[in-house]
Amino acid sequence: GSEMCIRDRMTIIFIRKNCVSRRKIMPDYTQEFTTIPYGPLGIIALPGCEELAQKIDRYLVKWRAQKQSEHKNSLSFAGYERDTYIIDASFPRFGSGEGKGSLHESVRGYDIFIVCDMFNYGVTYNMYGQTIPMSPDEHFANLKRAISAVGGKAHRITVIMPMLYEGRQHKRSSRESLDCAIALQELCNNMGVDNIITFDAHDPRVQNAIPLKGFENVQPAYQMIKALVNNVDDLHLDKEHMMVVSPDEGGMSRCIYYSTVLGLDLGMFYKRRDYSRVVNGRNPILQHQFLGSNIEGKDVMVVDDMISSGESMLEVAKKLKELGAKRIFIFSAFGLFCEGLENFDKSFAEGNITKVFTTNLVYRTPELLQRDWYCEVDMSKYLSYIIDTLNHDMSVSKLLNPADRIYALLERKGFKKETE
């Protein structure tokens, strides 16, 4: 009991002495840490996520080095300040295509965060002399290998899976598999994962498959709006000059948020599908019908969770142009571009799209990064805040609700009067 009192007192002293310096390091929306770390922080980067993990690691190393305290080296803060928080791990493959996961340092008692990209087809391996791009199933197998290599020694395991594995197969329409729910149950119920952190889930209700485990669905709204105001000139965020449009009825909830915080009108497209047949795993779209007010002469924000082939998004952009839209900005957390970039190049050349904003949470080809119409939204700093806060076992509510940050950003950029 006496040791616990001493530790708590030392923690309070640590916090009080660092309040001033922390305000200089952290932005206004982060709260002061009032708890000791849950355990030494460790980040495992799966193949294809090394660049993102390194960016996160640089932020964490910088912040924790700047936090001055005479108690930083006490037992409660053992391993708090290090040169890197990335755990040395490897995932070699045999010639037959079989693989394994190996950790090259101890993680006993650690608070482990595993960063993974289930859709990074830029990672390849050799199988029987052939070069094979990794599929989502193989990335998921690597995730399970990493958890297996930890071997139950970690204090807690959190999986950061920006685009949810099999997230589009979240419900059953007939005799179909429920891949996403089964994957979540396998990770949490069978392999000991405590928390899942994902971004802009296709349907966040899939978390009902793991009701006793943590599931955070993070929206990149603030980072998207910040990228817009920083990269587009002659921008007017008011009802007379801009509008938010959802490409389908399923994405209305995220568009309602954008229209509310920005004070803009909202519209949507209704996708009329042919439910009598299935083409490439989905019912083909027969027609896009716009529902909303007049958009003639207005800039339009088209917001969706992902760009797969991009066919539907480009069709929406073309329809908006026909209705008299001025500039069209496409916002999507995940830009997969499954059928290449040629259609987007053509649409940009025809003036149908102006900018496409996607995050760096999934693989982006070098060709995509060179396109004039593309703008990358960096999420590494935001992820660093989430990891740092969770490692202290603190609430992330303020991080997950970016309304205050959006209003502050618009005020700094001179949009306050227009958005009120």
Image (spheres, helix red, strand yellow):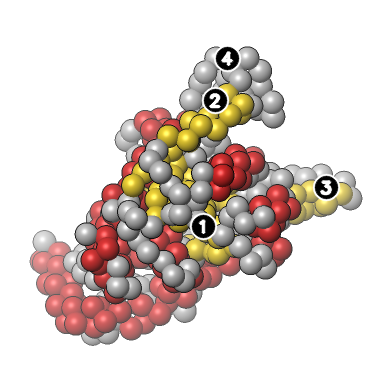
Residues 62 and 9: in front is 62
Identify the residue at horizontal 55%, vertical 33% (top origin): 288
Marks 4 and 1, how far apart at CA:
43 Å
Q: Are the residues flagged by discs 1 and 2 in contact, CB closer than 8 Å?
A: no
Residues packed near mark 2 inside 10 Å, few (<14), some (14 to 19) or many (20 plus): some
Residue at figure coordinates x 62%, y 49% from the top left: 336
- Residue 383, relative to residue 55: is it above or below? above
Alpha-carbon span between mark 2 and mark 3: 43 Å
Label 2 vs 4, first from the N-terminus: 4
- Label annotation for residue 272: 2
Task: Give the alpha-carbon distance from disc 4 to disc 3, as whole Å.
Answer: 33 Å
* Percent x, y of residue 394: 25, 58
The residue identified by callout 3 is: 127
Q: Residue 175 carries which label?
A: 4
Q: Specify which label sits upstream in the sequence, 1 or 2.
A: 2
Three-letter residue code for mark 2: Arg
Residue at the disc numbered 1: 327
Residues at discs 2 and 4 in contact (Cβ within 8 Å): no
Q: Where is residue 285 in the image (x, y as percent from the top left)?
A: 61, 28
Q: Which amino acid does label 4 sit on?
A: Arg
User: Does the image show residue 288?
Assistant: yes
